Image (tube, grey):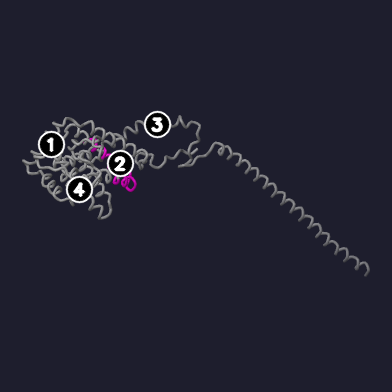
Amino acid sequence: MPHTVPRAGAAQGGRPRWWTELPLIAVVYAAYSAGRLLARGDVSTAVDHGLAILHFEQRLNIDFESPLNDLFTAHALVGIPADFAYASLHYVFTPAILIWLWKRRKASDYRFLRTWLLVSTVIGLIGFTLLPTCPPRLLDAGHGFVDTMAQYGSYGWWGSDASAPRGLGGLTNQYAAMPSLHVGWALWCGVALWRHGRSVWAKVGAVGYPLAITLVVMGTANHYFLDAAAGVATMGLGALLARPALRLSGALRTRLRPAREATVASRNAGVPANVGDKCETAARERERIPRQQGRGADRQRTDGAEDDGGRGAGAGTGGRGGDATATGDAAPTADDGAPAAAR
């Protein structure tokens, strides 16, 4: 009996199945969202962290969020699109790139980029927990920042609680600002487009999208410049840890595979083995095959006997024809003798 041929994608190097990838990503994102809520921390502590970051930037003259927020506040043509981008692209563009990688690129590339994104998200969650930070828009008005999400809230679906829809502000953590995963995820999208996009527009988007999101998060006063820099550092650390994480998951799968195969074997005891991919031979078909072969052999023997009988009959007919020919030849001999006697 031929050995079972593994299905495509079943091996570690095959393309992951969507019904295993989707729950994995959903669980990680749910844990990330829940962790943000649990890591709110004390408001006064978050404000102190935010002020410390702002004062540090001001001493180094890198508080780029201040002039950008002035620009977005003064010009609605800039501020409103920026608010829409902040409230939507983070949740739309990143999953779209992930799906594109799964469908169009090699399985190994997808696995690395997916693992990189997930590991970096977990690192960001650790940062939210250890360093709750008040964003610029929630600081005292004397620091000069305006919450553009609240200023232009009538144009969109969000309320005054960051990018959360109206009435759902309690489901978000407004003090999860350090690091900025808006910037981090945008950088991930840019790297994916640059490495695997083939058109000129893909290259343009690979550079333009992370830069645009960086300007948006600062201009809307949702993040400091150092938040954005920390988002880039988070993705860098996640990239370094992605391959070790893949090796660890591969080792765990290898260790768990014998137990899983034993479970499947016990469950499929008595079930016919596969003779090829998606092809099985039923038990009654295997029983029918010897009978068909036996009938075929009987038919061949019957046909051989008939052929031998036909040849024997042909030989008998030929013998009778030879006797007639011999008689015909003898008759003229007797006739030839009669005239001789008359003479």
Q: Which residue carries the number 1 mark?
A: 50
x and y percent of residue 213 in the render?
20, 46
Q: CA distance from mark 2 to mark 3?
A: 22 Å
Which residue is at the front of the view, 257 or 42?
42
- Helix, strand or loop under label 1: helix
Query: Count of labels shown?
Result: 4
Q: Is residue 201 magenta?
A: no
**Crowdedness near tag 2: few (<14), some (14–19) or many (≥20) residues, C-alpha within 10 Å:** many
Callouts 1 and 2 close, C-beta under 8 Å: no
The type of residue carrying mark 2 is Arg
Q: Is residue 241 left or right of residue 322?
A: left
The type of residue carrying mark 1 is Gly
- The outermost residue toward the bottom is 343
Q: Which residue carries the number 3 mark?
A: 260
- Segment colored magenta: 96-123
Residue 82 is tagged as 4
Q: Earlier in the sequence, mark 2 or mark 3?
A: 2
Residue 61 is tagged as none
- Helix, strand or loop under label 3: helix
